[in-house]
């Protein structure tokens, strides 16, 4: 019983120490998560490419999640089969053939998709997460 608790606290303490060491030495192993929407101003029914670039700093990728507002519409998880998942969000049509770990192509874009889009990157095992958000505007022809 005594040993069990000692081990449990020792492990928690070790994990905390590693985390603190990482934050003090500023080697947060994930940086430069940048979302680029091209074009940012898109005509209704056209397509737009959302690119998410990131520096994993030698870590493995766990997942990249894509959101419009709070709603996730696409997820890339290399360790899963299939590695891509599309979630139905009204008005969003994902071109899966042109979407991968770093980009998502949206087709037949509806007016009501104007708003904020985000990509959120998480590293494998360490589960560090960073995200970026950019607005997209849908206009009349
Ligand atoms: C919309 O699509 C047309 C034809 O594919 C293209 O010529 C035009 O530049 C696009 N406009 C925008 C704003 O994306
Ligand atoms: C956008 O409009 C379509 C119908 O044109 C609807 O199905 C969808 O739910 C709407 N999406 C949002 C995010 O409001
Ligand atoms: C995507 O690729 C598959 C296999 O290459 C093809 O059968 C399908 O028609 C493509 N879908 C689109 C929307 O282009
Ligand atoms: C994703 O697809 C685009 C376009 O096909 C390609 O340029 C890019 O290299 C791909 N990214 C990866 C990580 O495979
Ligand atoms: C988009 O994000 C900006 C900055 O974070 C915020 O000010 C704005 O209200 C957001 N727009 C929507 C439609 O949520």
Image: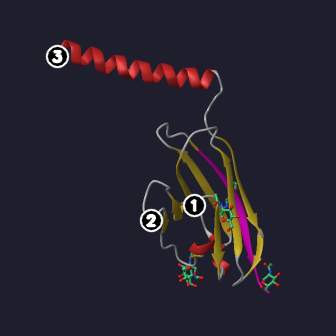
Q: Can you tell which mark lies on residue 1?
A: 3
- Comparing 17 with 97, the one in front is 97
Task: Residue 39: give x, y in percent of width and height.
Answer: 78, 70
Task: Note whether ligand 4 is within 8 Å of mark 1.
Answer: no
Q: Please give the name of the residue rendered at 65% of the width and 83% of the height, measured from the top-left corner.
A: 108
The label shown at residue 66 is 1
Q: Nearer the viewer, mark 1 or mark 2?
A: 2
Q: Quadrant of residue 139?
A: bottom right
- Position of residue 97 measured from the top left corner of the image (x, y, whole percent): 59, 74
Label 1 element class: strand
Q: Are marks 2 and 3 in contact (CB under 8 Å)?
A: no
Query: Which tag, 2 or 3, sits closer to the chain's start?
Result: 3
N-terminal label among 3 and 1: 3
**Quarter the N terminus occupies:** top left
| Residue 69 visible in rendering | no
What segment is highlighted magenta in the picture? Answer: 130-141
Residue drawn at (42%, 62%), measured in percent from left and top? 81
Q: Quadrant of ligand 3?
A: bottom right
For image coordinates 22% across by 13% down, the residue present is 3
Q: Position of residue 66 (x, y in %)?
A: 57, 60
Spatial CA span between label 1 and label 2: 17 Å
Left or right relative to 108: residue 9: left
**Disc 2 to disc 3, how far (Cα)?**
44 Å
Badge 3 local density, few (<14 within 10 Å), some, or many (20+)? Answer: few
Magenta stretch: dominant SS? strand
Give the spatial CA distance, label 3 vs label 1.
45 Å
Is 49 on the left or on the right of 119, as rendered? right
Q: Which residue is mark 2?
A: 82
């Amino acid at each position: 019983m005594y040993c069990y608790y000692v081990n449990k606290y020792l492990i928690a303490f070790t994990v905390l120490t590693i985390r603190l060491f990482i934050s003090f030495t500023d080697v947060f192993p994930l940086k430069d998560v940048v979302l680029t929407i091209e074009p940012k101003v898109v005509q209704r029914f056209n397509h737009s490419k959302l690119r998410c670039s990131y520096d994993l700093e030698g870590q493995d990728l766990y997942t990249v999640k894509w959101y419009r507002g709070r709603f996730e519409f696409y997820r890339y998880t290399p360790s899963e089969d299939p590695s891509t998942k599309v979630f139905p969000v009204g008005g969003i049509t994902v071109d899966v053939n042109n979407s991968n770990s770093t980009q998502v192509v949206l087709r037949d874009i509806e007016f009501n998709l104007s708003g904020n889009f985000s990509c959120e990157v998480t590293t494998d095992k360490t589960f560090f997460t960073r995200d970026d958000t950019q607005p997209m505007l849908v206009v009349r022809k």
